[in-house]
Amino acid sequence: MSDWPEGYGRCLLDEVDSTLDEAARRAPTLSGPEWILAKRQTKGRGRRGRAWKEPTGNFAATLVLRPKGPADQVALRSFVAALAVYDACIALCGEVPGLALKWPNDVLFNGGKLAGILLESAGSGNDGGVSHLSIGIGVNLIETPMQEWLEPGAVWPVSLLSETGIQVTPEVFLGELAAAYARLEAQFVTYGFEPIRTAWLSRAARLGEVVTARTMTSETEGTFETIDASGNLVLNTAKGRISIPAADIFF
């Protein structure tokens, strides 16, 4: 098991409304980054405010940071977090095939959704950034959500246990995840997004294949070509090469 990274706080809770909400409450008084892990969430949520229930034994945690830099660069930490989840799985299970990263912020295993990431920020920093950033991470360690909890068209969920036969506790997963994130965060702060972008693309699901990007108002089909320096999805479509900042991806 990896050593806990220096400078990162750790809060373990039996129950909370959501780790994201707890992060928002704690953020104003924190002097450094802190991980908040809960055994049970009573009001967990997913993207666009969707309700989310976390089966017992799965991983639900939020990392709250006070990052420097403009808001658009701060948001690139979704890719840092996705790589950290990927690396934590490798650390615990070995070089298992089938792991992949789905734009913008999911981790897949054998084609099913293993983990999801949700970023929330608040306030304005002195440099045009944010006062704090919360990175919520949910990982199906033991169980998968029930079908009625899923949004329409969502990738079918899988668990680490179902795909590998390895049972991992949330506390153990947090140790590996925190170590991986701290290493990647240091790389991001020192060298910028490009090394993170390169590493993410090397693990990307459906790169070079046709995907569909859906927003609340439009749908675009094209070949997944890359992600750009701003983390946008770049598709080669019948109308040419386009860049998409936010969407749900289907394939």
Image: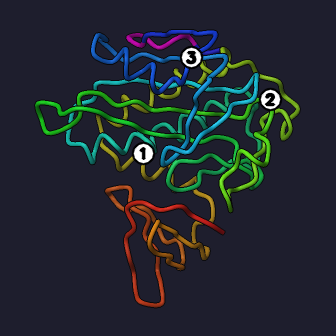
> Mark 2 vs mark 3: which is more N-terminal?
3
Looking at the image, which is closer to me, 176 or 143? 143
- Residue located at (60% from left, 34% from top): 87
User: What is the secondary structure assignment of the residue under circle 3?
Assistant: loop
Earlier sequence position, callout 1 versus callout 2? 2
Q: Secondary structure at mark 2?
A: loop
Residue furthest to the left = 126
Find residue 143 and report its horizontal and vertical position in percent.
80, 33
Classify mark 3: residues with Cα within 10 Å, few (<14), some (14-19) or many (20+): some
Q: Give amino acid for label 1.
A: Ile
Q: On the image, numbered disc 3 is attached to which residue?
A: 16
Question: Residue 222: which disc?
Answer: none
Question: Marks 2 and 3, how far apart in space?
Answer: 20 Å
Looking at the rendered structure, the kind of residue marked 3 is Val
Mark 2 sits on what residue?
142
Classify mark 1: residues with Cα within 10 Å, few (<14), some (14-19) or many (20+).
Answer: many
User: In the image, which is nearer the foreground, mark 2 or mark 3?
Assistant: 3
In the image, 146 versus 66, the foreground residue is 146
Residue 196 — which label?
1
| Mark 1 or mark 3, whichever is nearer to me | 3
Horizontal side of 48 relative to 120 (left or right) equals right
Q: Alpha-carbon distance for marks 1 and 2?
A: 29 Å
- Give SS at disc 1: helix
Quadrant in which the C terminus is drawn: bottom right
Q: Residue at coordinates 68% horizontally, 49% vertically from top-left?
A: 108
Give the CA distance from mark 1 to mark 3. Answer: 32 Å
Task: Mark 2 and mark 3 in contact? Answer it, CB < 8 Å.
Answer: no
Q: Work out whether 85 lies above or below 218.
A: above
For residue 63, side relative to residue 221 (left or right): left
* Number of the front mark, 1 or 2: 2
Bounds of the magenta segment? 3-8
- Residue 37: x and y in percent read 57, 17
